Structures are given as structure tokens and as C-alpha cells.
Amino acid sequence: MTPPREEIPMRINRTRLMESMDALGRVGETPRGGLTRLALSDEDRLGRDLLVRWMREAGLTVTIDRMGNMFGVRAGREALPPVMMGSHADSVPTGGRYDGQLGVLCALEAIRSLDDHGIRTRHPVGMIVFTNEEGARFQPAMLGSAVLAGKIPLEDAYNARDKDGLRLGDELERIGYLGPEPCAARPYRAYLELHIEQGPQLEEEGLQVGVVEGIVAIAWSRLTLRGVQDHAGPTPMRIRHDALVAAADVIGGVRALARRIGGDIVTTVGRLDVVPNIPNAIPGAVSLSIDVRDPDDRQIDRALEGIDELVREAARREGVTYDLAHYWRVPRTPFHADVVGAVEDAARSVGCGYRRILSGAGHDAQYMAAVCPTGMVFVPSRAGRSHCEEEFTAPDDIEPGANALFLAALSLAGRAE
Ligand SMILES: [Zn+2]
């Protein structure tokens, strides 16, 4: 006898989800169990091919826009704006297999689960796979969602180049994912993104789900220092203009700035390019990146002023010239109260441990918050590690998050009886 529908627990299929994680995780897998699937690489193409096949097999209507963002939509009973779930499928080099991919596959799993339970929703329910979220190959990060939200012009995104000079637009075309649909905001009921926390808070507190209230403000700067390249032997110290010495001052200064401002601010110099980068020449030019984050936009303003000053001083001391560009900024993004509430209610009914949390990392949800009511579900990261091969979230921690995503999407889409 079939039990009445109410008695079937409304849950996702954990086995199927983990099988999908394994299958997609093999595309671009590294020998140590991590993932290298850079945006618009051959591996990205293979991963996309698999996702498109799965979306079609799940009966979704699949479309691809001019930025290569991929959409799969399951019809609702009414022609209303859809509830979308999603994340990205690109990775950093030797990254992990949970960042991005998990959110995409939990979205797919939630949709497959609607079918398992024979559920019709009022609003359509769909998924989005965003292009170039990581910013590892093409800068800035989150380009697919940025163009969709109208924050960056499509042509500017196309003209982004990787370190080998390859153009994003050309690479998108090369892998066959420059789609016909306009890359533009559409009316959505809501956007929900499940993602690994990438920090230690949930694990430290023994919780399974983070109900994300918003994302911290982020600013990226790029600095080029130009000194005088010369021989490391015959050139006396008193006449040197060493770009790397000035850069070292800047790096120390950026760290000290965070200590001085205090609170939750974090500052990072993550990239350094030294010319000519050989043992026996005084470095003639150095380029470096500066990443600043804080929950409060005013603290970012303070930090950028501080950076202007410390760069000026470091350059003056060493007698070098410089270009400093604060070229990318995303303000603090609060998520929509209704969506945050839906995620919290869902976490409660899943019966897991949860708390409200702020994201220190940028996500596509940050741009989607400008398009429609948006929220996120975090799951724990072991030891807080991410963007590395050790990145790991236990299936026991994935399942409650995936169920929270599923139930939150269902409640926002409304059940059609
Ligand atoms: Zn991510």
C-alpha cells in the first residue's frame, strides 16, 4: 500500500547527490583528489556538457546566455517568475571539489527530488550555473552574474584576458558555450545558493547549516611599482631603486593597516609579479594585488585611504613610481528577509543545528541580490579550508544543507495542489 503523500519524508536523495558529486568531480580531478577546472578551459567544457545532459534528463528546459551562464527550468503550474537555485562550476587551480560544484548539484538534486515526490509547484523552479565565478583565470571574479545583473558591460567581460592573453569572449566561443540568450536580469521569484562556508565557524560550533544573512563588502586594488632594473653586483646600495623593496613595504603596510583598523577587517596581498624575477638583477617592476574585506563599507573606505597613503610613502622612500587602481568594489550585501526567513524555517524543519552567519567570501548571490530576493545556505568546511585540495565537507553535513535548500525553494515556489 502506498502511504499518503504527507507521510513520505520530504527529503533529497543523498546517495544520488553524492554519486553526482563523484561523477562531476572526476572532470578536472587532480591526483590528490582536488579539482582544476578553470573557467572556459577544456575541463570546464566537459563539466558543462555533463551538467547540460543531466538537466535535460531531469526534464528541464535548458538555455544558455551570451556569457555562457546556463539555465535549466522546471515548469510550474502558473506562468510566474521562477525560483532559481545555483552556483558556479569553475574552480581555482588545485582547488577543491566542493566550492561551487556542490551548490550546482544540490540545486539539481532539489529539482530531481521534486520529481521523486511528484510535486508540482506554483512557480517554476530552476537552476543557474554561472560562468567564471572564481576570477582565477579571468578577472574580476563573479563575471557571469555581474553581467547578468548589469554591473559590468558584456563587452568588458568579453575583453577580459587570462595570463596568456587569451580573451574571454574567444574562449567562450571556443568551448561552444557562447549562447544565444541575452545576458540580462529577468523577473525571478527568488535566488538561492548553497555553498561551503570556506571558514571555520560552523564546524567549530558543531552546526550543519549556516543561514546566510549577507556578504561582506569587498574591494580589489592593483598596484604596479616601477624602479630601475640593474645588475645585482656592481650597483651600490645607495643608487638603487628596487621595486620589490617598495613592494615589501607595501605588503607589510597592508598587514599593519588591518591591525590598526581592527574589528573584522581582513587585508591580503595574494599576487606578486616580479620583473625580471631572476637572482642577479635588481627588480625593475612589481605588480601586486590587494584584497580588502569588511562587513562595514565605511571601514573599506578607511582602508583604501590608508592604502593610498602607505603606497605613496613606500614609493617615496625607495624612489620608485607607481600606478594604483582601486578597480573593483562590491558593497556589503544584505540578503532578503523573506528568503533568509525561508532558509531558517527550512533548517529548523530539517532538524539540524543552524545559525545565522555572514559570508566573508564573494558569491554570485551577491550580484543576484540586486536582481531578485536572494539568500544562501552554508554547509561546514572541514578545518575551514577551501581553495585547496584538502577542501572537504562530510556527506552527513551536506545532507541537511541540501534538504534546507530543497525545502526553502519549495516554500518560495509554493506547492500546487
Ligand atoms: Zn565558490
Image (cartoon, rainbow, N blue to C red):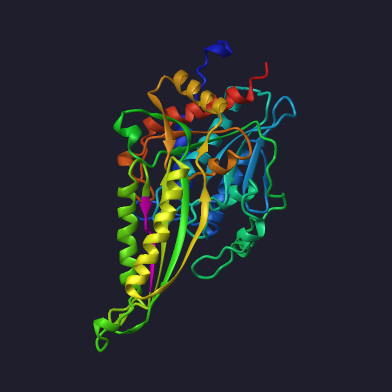
Of residues 278 and 21, the one nearer the viewer is 278
Q: Which residue is drawn at 33% across and 53% down?
A: 257
Q: Is residue 221 left or right of residue 124?
A: left
The magenta region covers 267-274
What percent of the width, then of the height, locates residue 77? 72, 24
* Position of residue 330 in the picture relative to residue 316 (left or right): right
| Placement of 339 over or under 367, stated as above or below | above
Percent position of residue 120, x then y: 66, 23
**Is residue 273 inside the magenta stretch?**
yes
Q: Can residue 99 be seen in this view?
A: no
| 173 with respect to 273 (left or right) | right
Looking at the magenta stretch, what is its main secondary structure? Answer: strand
Q: Residue at x 67, y 30 (%)?
A: 124
Q: Which percent across, then down, holds residue 211?
A: 45, 29
Quadrant where the image shows the N terminus = top right
As rendered, which of 410 and 190 lies closer to the eye? 190
